[in-house]
Image: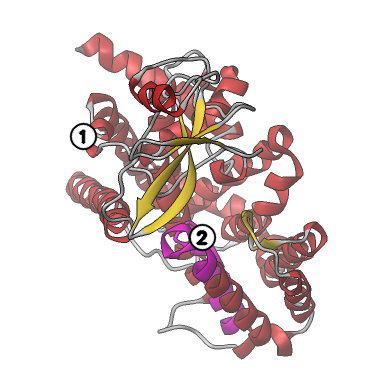
Amino acid sequence: MRHRSRCCLVMAAGVATSSASHAHAHVKWFSPYDLSGPPQQIERVFDYNFDLLCALSILLLVLGCAIESRAPGRALLRGINALTRSIETNSDTLIRGGCGFFLVALWTLGNIILTPELKTDQAWISWFQLAIAACLLWQATLVYAAIGLFTLYAIGMHDYGIFHLLDYPIFIGLALYLFMSGTQKTLFKIRAIDVLRVSVAITLMWASVEKWAYPQWSYPIIADNPKLTMGFPREFYMQAAGLVEFALSFAIILGPLVRRAAAAMLLGIFVSAIGPFGKIDAIGHAPIIAVLAVILGDGASGRALLSVEIKSIWSFCRGTALLTCSFGAFLATFIAAYYLLHTELYPNIEISLCVCTAHAPDKQSAGASRIKQSHELTACRVLRETSGERAHFVATSPAELRPQPTLCEIDPKGGTDAAPD
């Protein structure tokens, strides 16, 4: 058991360093996905490795809070303040500039609502995004930019559903920030940057749960880049990458030193992911990169949503208990919310995960091939029924999870037809 624990800790450290190029590349931008499919069974998420990774995350958070509460932490904070003073002074310009670049890039690409996978055939939306970018130029028009972001989020929710848009609460945070910045008001005495900070934390925590619920979406990326896992099993890699993301996101709501260290690590991860994943990743993550830079520059005056001071043995025990309970509560809340909302929003769905042959001579043999694990074709398009409506989606083979040029269309009730290209 002790040897296994040491191996898991070494693996976790390796994954934490290697996750830079994948953990924050949004998988929906680069791989096939199907939100209506059933997520991974929750008992497969909570295993020995997961518990050990959680314990390691809590230990590092306690260590960070302990350093922050003592003289070395205060000296380190003064040094960070000196290095990032220009960022704090120009934080509003940085947020507006990052959002402006993002919206202009979306206008240039065209047919996109806020994020690369949200496609639209409404040409006016691209021009609307350009108009929002123009509103960012003046303080007096920031309120209109905020209203525009709210509108785009609502359009995306209408077209793609609320569950899909739950991936992006950062846009709600940006809209609130712009509104508060334009009106020079706080929200229940909470600063605009703190609203942004919470929205980023929620966004990344939700994304980490999705890594555990649908690890198979990332397998094509791992297959194309096998060095990402550093030789670790892909299942463990996804488990650890999600927990690294969750722990750093949780750290963003803690004290000034811990959250700024977490922001610096997340910033490095997002920026380093641009190289392997290109301009789509750079454009899609431009707002969150700008926000993380501002969090890094936010001085000690920033409010800690969860304050933990560790200065003595008693405070160490109390702080450890508080962090453990808080981390566990956040983890349980986000996992429960993801799975329960998915069950509520996608009820009574039967998924026919199948692998069918590419040379079936007739409908009967093709229908029978649904239960034969043939590897001649690793993806098929399946017809399903959802609340009385028929819809298409891509289901993939457990072996490769990779679409192939030849597809077949299967009705779960028996028939099959050739699918158009």
The amino acid type found where label 2 is placed reads Tyr
The quadrant the N terminus occupies is top left
Task: Give percent across and percent down for residue 280.
Answer: 71, 46
Q: Nearer the viewer, residue 173 or 318?
A: 173
The amino acid type found where label 1 is placed reads Glu
Residue range of the region highlighted in magenta in the rendering: 157-181
Secondary structure at numbered mark 1: helix
Residue 258 visible in the displayed image: no
> Is 45 in the magenta?
no
> Is 172 in the magenta?
yes
Q: Quadrant of residue 180?
A: bottom right
Q: Which residue is mark 1?
A: 43
Residue 399 visible in the displayed image: yes
Q: Residue furthest top?
A: 3
What numbered label is drawn on residue 294?
Answer: none
Q: Residue at x 33, y 56 (%)?
A: 346
Q: Nearer the viewer, residue 112 or 137?
A: 112
Task: Give percent across and percent down for residue 205.
Answer: 41, 51
The quadrant the C terminus occupies is top right
- Mark 2 and 1 residues: CB-CB less than 8 Å, in contact? no
What numbered label is drawn on residue 168?
Answer: 2
